[in-house]
Image: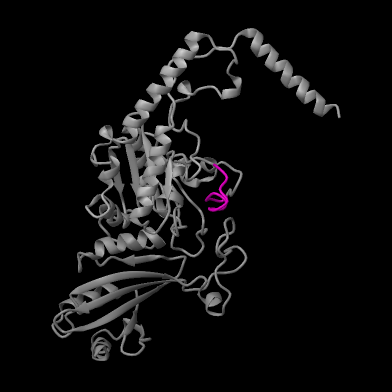
């Protein structure tokens, strides 16, 4: 399922767990590497499946979008169908921070603290234009988007967004979570391969620079 | 209906009234600052007026009023304030403060108005008469910087204490921001240059006035 381009899957995974890009992997893998890679993909899939389908949300509701959030949570649109069943009213038990409404400057320390209190892995959804970009509150009191203060994974536009948009945003976020990869072991390149890479790069650049 | 109130006020406080620029039954009395408390106490306590409800205190900045009325408009610029105080002398009296009074029993209302020069922005407080004036006067202080002499707790009510300047004054830069926590700086086409006097390219955390005043222990 790929309706929309999903952004980089590494998302909120800490730097240390990032996989190196594919092209820098050595071509020849040992059987042990292959087995580990297989196991890694399976485990990543299982973890992604589990995480994507049990998103506990923390609703940071500050404004009128809260009405729409209630509508999304209630029976007619029912966010629980997609696994986002429980709103947790402590950030320590939540996976998904939903910023619902305008974030003004006075609230940014609170928002930042709530985000930092959440345990890893954590994701953030900006619900509505005010949380995404400040909306039409282009004034002295309003933060121009929550992403100026904390990282945001999914932006749901709309003033307020329709519940269908929120569900769509949640599914995009689930897609992102499912496609995250978790590294079991580190792949270290040997010294010779690194040197060869450098030389190749230099030759390539030199070809262009000498022209 | 409120005309009778003005006539009454002319009888009892003839020195206090400057003018009565009412319009279509929406009566306004411009009063002198010195007699404000006397007038307010009379209006509240006299049974003929019975203005026990202070619905609102409002502030007005007339700095760009003339240019906006003639179609000039305020300059909504990022770096230049809406009005260059250095080049053009401000209109005087520049500020107005309006007290919207009402009577639930008598079903009439009246607006008191004060005119303030920008070099002497002090008003006696009316918190002793209406308790609700406490927050309204803090609001006017917060947004316009009018000082209410005798107010028990004249601090900012909406903006944070680190905020500098008074945002509803017309010479406050339209897109000036004073964030409390460091903000990420990234180019953004939709939202334009980042808020603040620096604009695009300058890290927002360095351009904002408020950053320098934030006590790091107050917000971790």
- Residue at (30%, 79%) from the top-left corner? B111
The relative height of residue B27 versus residue A72 in the rendered view (above or below) is below
- Residue at (35%, 77%) from the top-left corner? B113
Nearer to us in this view, B213 or B92: B213
The relative height of residue A77 versus residue A183 in the rendered view (above or below) is below
- Asked which quadrant contains residue A158, the reply is bottom left
Q: Is residue B108 left or right of residue A205?
A: left
Q: Looking at the picture, how far across and down is residue A97, in whole percent?
A: 33, 40
- Magenta stretch, overall SS: loop
Nearer to us in this view, A7 or A136: A7
Q: Which residues are magenta?
A: B186-197
| One can see residue A134 in this view | yes
Looking at this view, name the residue that lies furthest to the right: A211
- Residue at (23%, 39%) from the top-left corner? A88
- Residue at (28%, 39%) from the top-left corner? A83
Could you tell me which quadrant the C terminus of chain B lies in? Answer: top left
Q: Looking at the picture, how far across and down is residue B178, in whole percent?
A: 46, 48
The stretch drawn in magenta includes residue B195: yes
The relative height of residue B211 versus residue A162 in the rendered view (above or below) is above
Q: Looking at the picture, how far across and down is residue B99, in whole percent?
A: 30, 73
Could you tell me which quadrant the N terminus of chain B lies in? Answer: bottom left
| One can see residue A185 in this view | no
Q: Looking at the picture, how far across and down is residue A30, in whole percent?
A: 53, 9
């Amino acid at each position: 399922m790929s309706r929309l381009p999903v952004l980089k899957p590494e998302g909120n995974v800490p730097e240390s767990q990032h996989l190196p890009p594919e092209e820098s992997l050595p071509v020849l893998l040992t059987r042990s590497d292959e087995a580990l890679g297989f196991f890694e993909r399976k485990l990543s899939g299982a973890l992604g499946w589990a995480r994507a389908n049990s998103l506990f949300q923390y609703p940071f509701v500050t404004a009128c979008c809260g009405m729409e959030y209630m509508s999304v949570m209630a029976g007619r649109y029912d966010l629980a169908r997609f696994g986002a069943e429980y709103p947790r009213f402590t950030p320590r038990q939540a996976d998904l921070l939903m910023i619902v409404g305008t974030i003004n400057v006075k609230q940014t320390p609170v928002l930042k603290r709530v985000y930092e209190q959440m345990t890893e892995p954590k994701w953030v959804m900006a619900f509505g234009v005010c949380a995404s970009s400040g909306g039409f509150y282009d004034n002295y009191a309003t933060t121009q988007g929550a992403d100026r203060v904390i990282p945001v994974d999914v932006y749901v536009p709309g003033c307020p967004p329709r519940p269908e948009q929120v569900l769509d945003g949640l599914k995009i976020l689930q897609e992102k979570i499912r496609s995250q990869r978790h590294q079991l072991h580190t792949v270290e390149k040997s010294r010779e391969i690194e040197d060869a890479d450098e030389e190749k790069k230099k030759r390539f650049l030199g070809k262009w620079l000498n022209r | 209906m409120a005309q009778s109130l003005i006539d009454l006020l002319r009888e009892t406080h003839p020195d206090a009234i400057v003018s009565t620029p009412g319009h279509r039954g929406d009566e306004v009395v411009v009063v002198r600052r010195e007699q404000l408390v006397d007038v307010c106490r009379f209006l509240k306590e006299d049974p003929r007026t019975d203005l026990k409800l202070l619905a609102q205190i409002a502030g007005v900045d007339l700095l760009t009023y003339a240019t906006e009325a003639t179609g000039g408009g305020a300059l909504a610029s990022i770096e230049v304030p809406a009005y260059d105080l250095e080049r053009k002398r401000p209109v005087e009296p520049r500020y107005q403060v309006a007290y919207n009074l009402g009577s639930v029993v008598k079903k009439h209302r009246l607006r008191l108005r004060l005119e303030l020069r920008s070099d002497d922005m002090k008003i006696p407080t009316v918190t002793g008469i209406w308790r609700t004036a406490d927050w309204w006067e803090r609001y006017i202080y917060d947004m316009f910087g009018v000082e209410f002499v005798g107010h028990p707790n004249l601090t900012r009510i909406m903006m944070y204490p680190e905020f500098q300047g008074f945002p509803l004054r017309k010479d406050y830069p339209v897109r000036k921001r004073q964030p409390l926590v460091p903000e990420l700086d990234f180019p953004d086409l939709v939202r334009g240059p980042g808020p603040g006097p620096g604009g695009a390219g300058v890290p927002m955390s360095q351009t904002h006035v408020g950053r320098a005043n934030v006590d790091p222990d107050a917000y971790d």
